[in-house]
Amino acid sequence: MTPERHSLTGTGDPLLEPPPGCPAHGLGPGGLHRLHEADDLEELYEQLREQHGPVAPALLHDDVPMWVVLGHAENLHMVSTPAQFCRDSRIWTPLNEGVVKPDHPLMPHIAWQPICSHAEGEEHKRLRGAVTSAMSGIDYRELRRHIKRYTQRHVNRFCEEGRADLVGQFAEHLPMGVMCHLLGMPDEYNDRMVEAARDTLKGTETAIASHAYVMDALDRLTTARRAKPEDDIAGRLVTHAAGLTDDEVREHLRVVLLAAYEATVNLISNVLRVVLTDPGFRAQLSGGQMTVPEAVEQSLWDEPPFSTVFAYFAKQETELGGQRIRAGDGLLLGIAPGNVDPRIRPDLAASMQGNRAHLAFGGGPHECPGQDIGRAIADAGIDALLMRLPDVQLACDEDELRWRSSIASRHLVELPVRFEPKAQQDIRQQPSHAPASAQRTAWHVGIPRPESRPAPQVPPYPPEPVSVSAAQPQPVPEQPRPRGAWQRFLLWWRGY
């Protein structure tokens, strides 16, 4: 049962402030931790897990109460039980009681919007069905050719210099070029579009103008496809039998563009950082013991593009992870802490190759519909980059790397590298370098390791009672899932 002192709805007993002069840092009313003031969220999540178990009370900005779901099984249960939990913030008690003000820093993340990631029931089926159908027409073989072509184009910009920032000059550009192509507006891709997307997601002083720039482009695209449909995501949305309005088309194009962009930027940056800082990891890649897709999946376990998702809301009083959850309570989908739940990963150093049971793309009705796009961009883009620059090395000490962190994500600011200057390549050719190493052929995207794996063992909910610190069996990697277009998705994400 939930300890009564954790009155997250704001309607229970008053929460007490720490005593005057208390040196505790980041603590709010009732001694609860303020997530946004944590110096190290990863460390705080483990502290909360030790104190409260798989579901813990915490505070957001302005001391708004929120549950943090830390357990892997508890997160899966929450996202997969729409009868108990939903994404509709209009039932959130702190919002209805005026505790959350309109200018709250997290309102852009939490405020309800008429999009599929916030909808329920028949409306969710209508909107989600249109989005899923629009993505199902993607030709992934052709997409990978485009990704490799875009990669060469970006590498051509800096290959003769012998130095580059792989975040600012590669990871932040490749996904936008690919997404503009998929949506049906390749001509809109430019440095300004990349800057506008970054600015919108950071929430800076110029975010409103940047958001307007993005929406103007999507408005032009929607108008053009309404007049003349084509075989791209925008065209399929416009012509879908669900009968989306122009506003609905624009809003879902925005969600697809910005969410896929930010997630893929972080994913590419994280994988490249590990390749450049972990000699063992890189040796596995170059030696053929690990493929790039497997490296991407390992990163999705260890450093998911989004640490948490704002938010789910309890539709009724229930219990989760031993805590009493009241109707109207808010809960954070804890992707990063759930991925390191000691009940499924007792040894974080153990490889998770082949196991896709991570929480990086959520789950249930709101599972990310764009995960195959993100995987394809990361897989093909990283592979092509490393083939083009096989001698690339980090150009600074690892401890000099800087991050921009928030409750939602951890974004690498820059990744400076050096390499022997290379000549530009014809972007119509496949990436290559000479002489080609015999070992390197096993590094190509899509070449699986020649070993069979049983299905993953994911603990059911509710899980067996177990001490958090108790040793558990190693997680069993799964057989790689077939790369079908989109049929395997259940029914993602919020829009900003």
Image (cartoon, grey):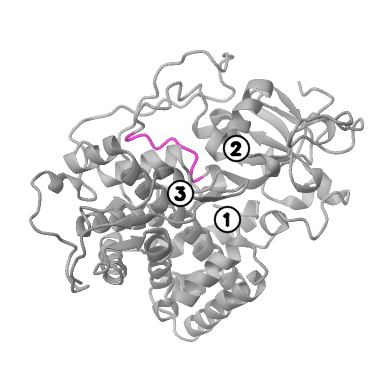
Left or right: residue 114 compared with residue 354: right
Question: What residue sits right under mark 3 in the picture?
Answer: 401
How many tags in the picture?
Answer: 3
Q: CA distance from mark 2 to mark 1?
A: 39 Å
Q: Earlier in the sequence, mark 3 or mark 2?
A: 2
268, 21: nearer the viewer? 21
Mark seen at residue 40: 2
The residue that appears at 78% across and 46% down in the rendered structure is 92
Q: Which residues are magenta?
A: 353-361
Q: Earlier in the sequence, mark 2 or mark 1?
A: 2
Image vertical order of residue 163 relative to residue 309, above or below: below
Q: Earlier in the sequence, mark 3 or mark 1?
A: 1
Image depth: mark 2 or mark 1 in front: 2
**Image quadrant where residue 302 sits:** top left
Q: State the image coordinates of residue 158 (x, y, percent, origin top left).
A: 30, 68
Q: CA distance from mark 3 to mark 1?
A: 43 Å
Left or right: residue 6 compared with residue 255: right
Q: Is residue 41 visible?
A: yes
Q: Is residue 69 magenta?
A: no
Image vertical order of residue 39 relative to residue 429, above or below: above
Q: State the image coordinates of residue 122 (x, y, percent, origin top left).
A: 63, 55
**At label 1, which amino acid type do we have?**
Lys
